[in-house]
Image (cartoon, grey):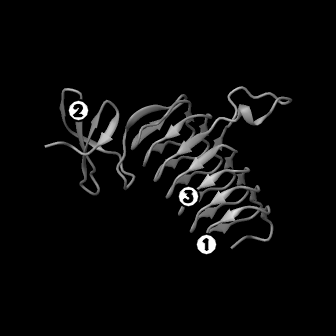
Amino acid sequence: MIHETAIVEDGVQLGEGTRIWHFAHIRKGAKIGKNGNIGKDVYIDTNVVIGDNCKIQNFASLYNGLIIGNNVFIGPHVCFTNDLFPRATIWNEERLVKTVVKDGASIGANSTIVAGITIGNYAMVGAGTVVTKDVPGHALVFGNPAQIQGFVCECGIKLEKKSKKKNVVQLFCPQCGKEVCIEDSIYKECEE
């Protein structure tokens, strides 16, 4: 479904079942996977890559150089940048800085993502956050600049501490019961 007011330029690769809503603009060369939802007034620049089952909320701005994995949530008014030293009269492809959002990540409303970072698998970025450095997988970050405030389960719930030994913290999900370990800010399966 593509709403009659949306602009989808020639050369866009659009996966089956993806819906494009009112006044969205998708530039040539963009690649969007299947079963996605592109909200009202979303701008997707040339050569942006979006995986399957992604939800891009109203007024989000996704610029050239962005790669988004599968099952990613992008909240309303989220802005991704692609030039670390922008000037109105200077632009060329050499200034383009790539950004990656990995599978399952969620980015809250009104967040700004500075170019050149990677947001890890199932990470969660709180609303209004300014992300200036890489976010590890499953990390919960918020603030300006973003700071790790904990870790989240694949089901989206903040993990709670079960135990701590040296530099390894064992966590569990109060909703689904999954247990994991965090070692030096890295999310992994616990060793016996």
**Residue labelled with disc 2:** 168
Q: Which residue is mark 1?
A: 16
The percent coordinates of residue 3 (x first, y second) are 75, 70
Does residue 122 sit above or below 17 in this rendering? above
Examine the rendered structure and indicate whether residue 100 appears above or below residue 114.
below
Q: Residue furthest left?
A: 192
Residue in the image at 70% along x and 52% along y: 44
| Residue type of the residue flagged with mark 2 | Val
Tell me which numbered mark, 3 or 1, is placed earlier along the sequence: 1
Q: Earlier in the sequence, mark 3 or mark 2?
A: 3
Q: Amino acid at mark 3?
A: Gly
Please report whichever mark, 1 or 2, sits nearer to the chain's N-terminal start: 1
Label 2 packing within 10 angstroms: few (<14), some (14-19), many (20+): some
Report the amino acid beneath label 1.
Glu
Residue 91: percent from the left, percent from the top? 80, 33
Q: Residue at x 56, y 30 (%)?
A: 132
Count every numbered label the image shows and give the total.
Answer: 3
Local secondary structure at mark 2: strand
Label 1: how many residues lie within 10 Å, few (<14), some (14-19) or many (20+)?
Answer: few
Image location (x, y in percent) of residue 157: 36, 50
Q: From the viewer's perspective, is residue 130 above or below residue 104?
A: above
What distance separates the C-alpha of mark 3 from that of mark 2?
33 Å
Q: Residue at x 32, y 41 (%)?
A: 187
What's the CA distance linking mark 1 and mark 2?
A: 43 Å
Residue at the (31%, 30%) spot, across then down: 184
Give the quadrant of residue 85: top right
Farthest right residue in view? 89
Q: Are marks 3 and 2 in contact (CB under 8 Å)?
A: no
Q: Nearer the viewer, mark 3 or mark 2?
A: 3
Please give the label number shown on residue 51: 3
Mark 3: secondary structure? loop
- Compared across the picture, whether 108 is left or right of 78 comes to left
